[in-house]
Amino acid sequence: MNTSQPSLSLEKPENWVISKIILNQFKSDPNFEIIEFVDHEKWTFKKLISLGLKVSHNINKLNVKKGESIIVMIDDPKLFIPIWIGASFLAVTFVAINTALRGEVLYHQIETSSPKLIIAEEKYYDEIMKINFDRKKTKLISPLDFNYSRELAETQIVESNNYDVSCVMFTSGTSGPSKGVIMPNCHCVLFAIGTIENYELKENDKFYICLPLFHANGLFMQLLACIINKNKAIIRGKFSASNWLKDIIKFKATHTNMLGAVANFVVAQKPTSLDKKHHLKLIGSAPLPKEPEKIFRTRFDVKHVVPLYGMTEVNIPLYGKKDELGNGTCGKLYKKYFEVEIRDPVSDQKVKNGEVGEIMVRSLVPYGFMQGYLGLPEKSFDSFRNFWFHTGDAGIKKSNGHFIFVDRIKDCIRKRGENISSYEVEQAFLKIPEVTEAAAYAVPAEGGDGMEDDVMVSLLLNKNSEINYLNWIEKAKLNLANFAIPRYIRIMSDFPKTQTGKIQKHLLKKEGVTNDTWKNIN
């Protein structure tokens, strides 16, 4: 790790506080260019701190106190980043939500967060104003309405500890609505430290960031890692497959992270003479099936292609080794800070190497991962049953220490890097008058090489109902993000059910896309 922080040792977890780290970097090297956007605008630590303090001044004027929440619904990284920094200076809980959310799902996240303030780009005002939240308790404002002429005084910066809640990010629900993950400072910083240590970031390395900053990967694994280790962050506000290689070449990026969908889109681009004309040393990817890894190593000549495994809840406890082939695995134990075992999902007993069980995780550092689900004490307690966090993912540990991700035990669907709640898809369709029962589940995406899911929903209709697939899709869009809209719809005469009346989704998944399934080609 780059040791240019003379007054703040990150070997001590008590110093894992976002605001302290950023202020320390500013004081040690204020003119260091920490961020460059793809339009070539550059920010030094001095500029970053100044913008953060200006946002802090505005939030403070709106009487948001330590521990209270603000929701941020912003795409533009030039607006998003200063708000994140500004919130940290006031020890305000930063609730970053997916800007694609609509309807009931958006309402649920606003209601659960109980924010004092919603800061949103004006293009999202119409969707937010459809939500029936308490406008006396929660103020809606655009970051463009802030007064950027004044900064928060340094004496007004609020003291924060590594155990204080820094952020809430919502992760997909599996048997209910999406859940807000309570993330203390320590948890957020450990995402970054994991990147720095496992990628072995050097002083002149540059990180290309094209994943959304409202997810932990983009914000903590990449941007915060750059801030901590003084590596320039190259930021594109929205991933573009056609610009991915161009950006990496132009800005001489050495490192980047991918999700399954990003990798798919990149390798789908036509080969060119520029494929190897870059400085890229390492790609981190979750998941990382064999074929994309092979393409990045051969066609693009990337020396290190590293698989990862993690969740918003538990950080990244598994990393591939730089000099080893991933070969379809999801990494080895990051043993400095985590324990990971494969255990029986019912008995919680440890299973033998090579046997399938549930991936379970423990942190070796206090506050090293989530402190629970917001407003859901029973689910929080259950997830930590027998002192292990239950990921809901099936996996195998090999005798050589490699872990293999097998499947999801939970009913979660992953599409284009997003986790989709089957429950929320079902609820959107159950609002349609013709629909009496619904079951949403994952099916393999066409040409996805095992990296991607498509959403399929099976429906039971009222008697004599007319079938109108396109109309149902339009109605579902009122309450679902575009990435959660089903690719396939199947009409059922009856559902396979357990004795207690629960739909047996595993049987539907096994049948997959049948001859009577309608395909959404839009």
Image: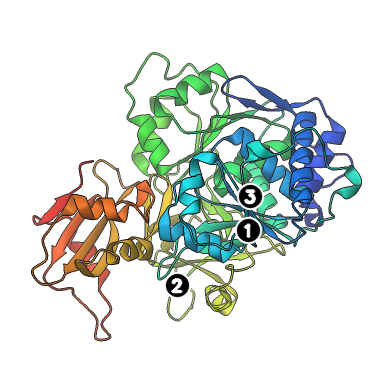
Of the residues shown, which amino acid type is indicated by label 2?
A: Val
Instruction: Locate residue 505 relative to residue 189 in the image: left or right.
Output: left
Please tell me the numbered disc located at residue 191.
3
Real-space CA distance between mark 1 and mark 3, rounded to the nearest whole angstrom: 31 Å
Q: Is residue 390 above or below residue 169?
A: below
Please tell me the numbered disc located at residue 138.
1
Residue tagged 2: 351
Taking the view exactly as shown, the residue that stands out farthest to the right is 155
Question: Are the two marked residues, 1 and 3, in contact with CB atoms closer than 8 angstroms?
Answer: no
Question: Are the two marked residues, 1 and 2, in contact with CB atoms closer than 8 angstroms?
Answer: no
SS type, badge 1: loop
Taking the view exactly as shown, the residue that stands out farthest to the bottom is 499
Foreground label between 1 and 2:
1
Q: Is residue 398 visible?
A: no
Question: Are the two marked residues, 2 and 3, in contact with CB atoms closer than 8 angstroms?
Answer: no
Real-space CA distance between mark 1 and mark 2, rounded to the nearest whole angstrom: 49 Å
Q: Is residue 304 visible?
A: yes
Residue depicted at x 39% and y 41%: 261
Foreground label between 1 and 3:
1
Where residue 12 sits: x, y (%)?
Answer: 81, 54
Real-space CA distance between mark 2 and mark 3, rounded to the nearest whole angstrom: 28 Å
SS type, badge 3: helix
Pointer 2 local density, CA inside 10 Å: few below 14, some 14–19, many at least 20: some
Of the residues shown, which amino acid type is indicated by label 1?
A: Thr
Where residue 334 sits: x, y (%)?
Answer: 60, 54
Residue depicted at x 35% and y 62%: 422
